[in-house]
Image (cartoon, grey):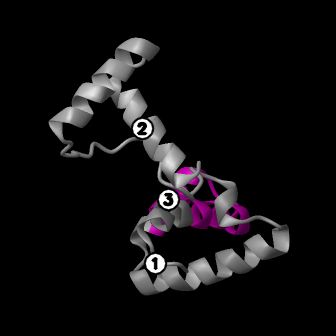
Amino acid sequence: MESDKGRGAIANKWICLYLRHVQKTSTSVAKKRLLAMTPREKLDVMLLTEQWMKETGQTLEARGRPLAQEPKGNKAYSVNLPIRDIGKLKQKSEESGESVSVLIRAAIRQFLGE
């Protein structure tokens, strides 16, 4: 059983599914049994769950939110620029109709080769 944080909730869901299947119980009964288990018992059941998943052709990643491969979104980053460069950027911004921020991001992407 993997110990990273993202897998805990997913692993618990799979253990509940396994308990429901093997013991032929309801979801609520399976959850109660899972909550009553010690960490060692959970590990033992997770090993059985992983074996059952392989036999049935299921994987942990098949359910829940996929793990992010690449960071997404934006991150604010402050850059100090010489006054003359800011003046040139503002002039280019007025000529192109794009904001200074858009021009800076485009220049960075161009520099990085993206």
Q: Which residue is mark 2?
A: 105
Residue 27, above or below 48: above
Please say if 96 is above or below 35.
above
Which residue is label 3 attached to? Answer: 31
Q: CA distance from mark 1 to mark 2?
A: 38 Å
Q: Position of residue 79 (x, y in %)?
A: 23, 46
74 sits to left or right of 58: left
Bin the neighbour count of mark 1 within 10 Å (Cα to Cα): few under 14, some 14-19, many 20 and up: few
Mark sitting on residue 3: 1
| Mark 3: amino acid | Lys
Magenta segment, which residues?
13-34
Relative to 111, 46 lies left or right: right
x 47%, y 60%: residue: 9
The residue at the point 36 percent across, 13 percent down is: 94
User: Dividing the picture into quarters, in which one does residue 62 lie?
Assistant: bottom right
Q: Determine if the magenta segment contains residue 27.
A: yes
Amino acid type, callout 2? Arg
